Amino acid sequence: MTDCISLVYELRKMWSQSMAWEKQTLAKIKWRIAVLALLSCGGALSVSTIQAAEPSAVSVNNKMLPASDINWSKYAGKVVVIDFWASWCGPCRESFPWMKQMQAKYGKDGLVFIGINVDKDPALALKFIQQYQPNFEIRSDQQGKLASQFKVPGMPSTFILGRDGQPAAKHQGFFKAKEAEYEAEIVRLLSNKNT
């Protein structure tokens, strides 16, 4: 874990020294490096450790696209909420309407939700998707590879990346009583326009 923290600080130092690059190109590179650093560290980095609207991706033949095919670079400069969920998860049923509402409200401001389904049976996930009609991208992680990289402790588990691609928050579970707190966190991250 110490090596991962050192890697993040070294990357930040390198980024600040390379401001001569075109801003957009730099943001894309920072995003890719941050996601790779996050994944190489097993997704174990969180804000406590480092202090620091697209329709569902369901193809026409009703199959979910794999999480391994996510093009992370297209989210450079955005606040990304990665939500691991399952059809059998009660709190997931409560979180989906809220995530839809947040995506509709803040998508134009740079908020992106990506739902990562971990069901072994894709038919169960597709039934859930039909019922809740998400207005955000949904991907499948049937083998649990991405969930393992992020060290997902249970359902739902949410990881939020700031506009700079750095891990900003991590939540386990979904609590209706905390909806205002979750939204305030998103608004705070969206207001940070520095990438």
Image (cartoon, rainbow, N blue to C red):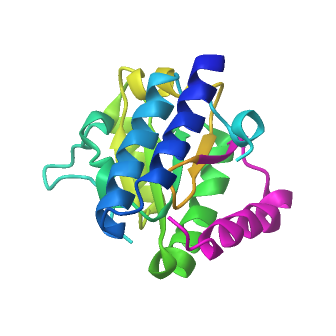
**Residue 88, above or below 106:** above
As for residue 174 lying within the magenta part, the answer is: yes
Lateral position of residue 139 relative to residue 46, left or right: left
Residue sitting nearer the eye, 27 or 67? 27
Task: Pinpoint residue 66: horizontal percent, then vertical percent.
Answer: 27, 37
Is residue 44 something that shows in the picture? no
Q: Could you say which quadrant of the image residue 33 lies in? A: top left
- In the rendered image, the quadrant that contains the N terminus is top right
**Residue 108, above or below 70:** below
Is residue 135 something that shows in the picture? yes
Residue sitting nearer the eye, 29 or 146? 29
Lateral position of residue 52 relative to residue 178, left or right: left
Residue sitting nearer the eye, 64 or 193? 193
Q: Could you say which quadrant of the image residue 35 lies in? A: top left
Task: Pinpoint residue 55: horizontal percent, then vertical percent.
Answer: 32, 66
Q: Residue at x 57, y 24 (%)?
A: 4
Work out which residue is located at the far left of the displayed protein and give it: 61
Residue sitting nearer the eye, 132 or 67? 67
Task: Pinpoint residue 77: horizontal percent, then vertical percent.
Answer: 44, 65
Q: Residue at x 36, y 26 (%)?
A: 142
Q: Residue at x 53, y 40 (%)?
A: 85
Q: What is the magenta range? A: 167-195
Q: Could you say which quadrant of the image residue 121 lies in? A: top left
As for residue 76 lying within the magenta part, the answer is: no
**Residue 20, above or below 29:** below
Work out which residue is located at the far right of the displayed protein and give it: 177
Q: Residue at x 35, y 58 (%)?
A: 26
**Residue 7, above or below 194:** above
The count of marks equals 0
